[in-house]
Amino acid sequence: MKLGEVRLLAPVQPSKIVCIGLNYAKHIEELGHTLHEDPVIFLKPLTTLIGPEDEILLPKMSQQVEYEAELVVVIGKTLKDVPEDQVLDSIFGYTCGNDVTARDLQRKDGQWTRSKGFDTFCPIGPYIVPDLNPSNLGIRSILNGEIKQSSNTEYFLHSVPKLVSYISQIMTLTPGDVIMTGTPEGVGPMKSGDEIIIQIEGIGELHNKVL
């Protein structure tokens, strides 16, 4: 059977989706937020998870739903209080992600649970790639063929080892858990009928339509 004859699902079924906010300085500037000393973390419910070619559903509550291209870390071992220098050996691999956000609700609420928690608001895929260097990967979002975000993970404020170590001091990470590592500048709205592609160097492309 050829790849074009099958439908890919999300490449992992995590016990939790841990997300990082405000991990690129220019994204902090474009949103008008304040730089935090420690990583900003939040959770998405598992019902947000969808795979390649699945549809992102626009909620009736929001009039401004935006894309956010992100590198996704997939955990390979149970981790608790892991030192930074031991993190990379405990990562199963990396994939592409889109931290879909209802920006108007994020501004209205002052916190992020509702704006980032709608069903279908966490596309990931198309597959998991091991043995990548997460500190220097090109990352882009492409909306209807037009490049909207174009950056590199070298601009992370908090590196992957620091993020995983920090999160493991708060909660136990288990195999299959995913960490969304934050988005660069250039976020913007999507509308029904759009196609959004998240492209990360060394991994590939995550395609989703907006409904």
Image: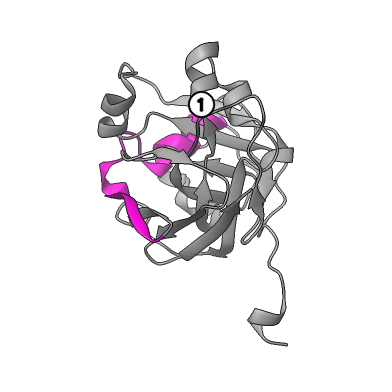
Secondary structure of the residue carrying tag 1 is strand
Residue 211 x/y as whole percent:
64, 48
Answer yes or no: is residue 207 visible. Answer: yes
In this rendering, is residue 170 above or below 13?
above
Give, as a single range, the part of the protein colored magenta. 145-168
Q: Amino acid at mark 1?
A: Ile
11 sits left or right of 65 in the view? right
Nearer the observer, 139 or 104: 104
Nearer the observer, 69 or 167: 69
Residue matched to label 1: 41
Residue 84 x/y as whole percent:
42, 39
Any magenta on residue 154? Answer: yes
Residue 132 x/y as whole percent:
41, 62
Nearer the observer, 46 or 140: 140
In this rendering, is residue 104 above or below 201?
above
Look at 40% across and 59% down and name the residue there: 200
Residue 35, quarter of the rendered image: top left
In this rendering, is residue 17 above or below 95?
above
Residue 161 x/y as whole percent:
42, 42
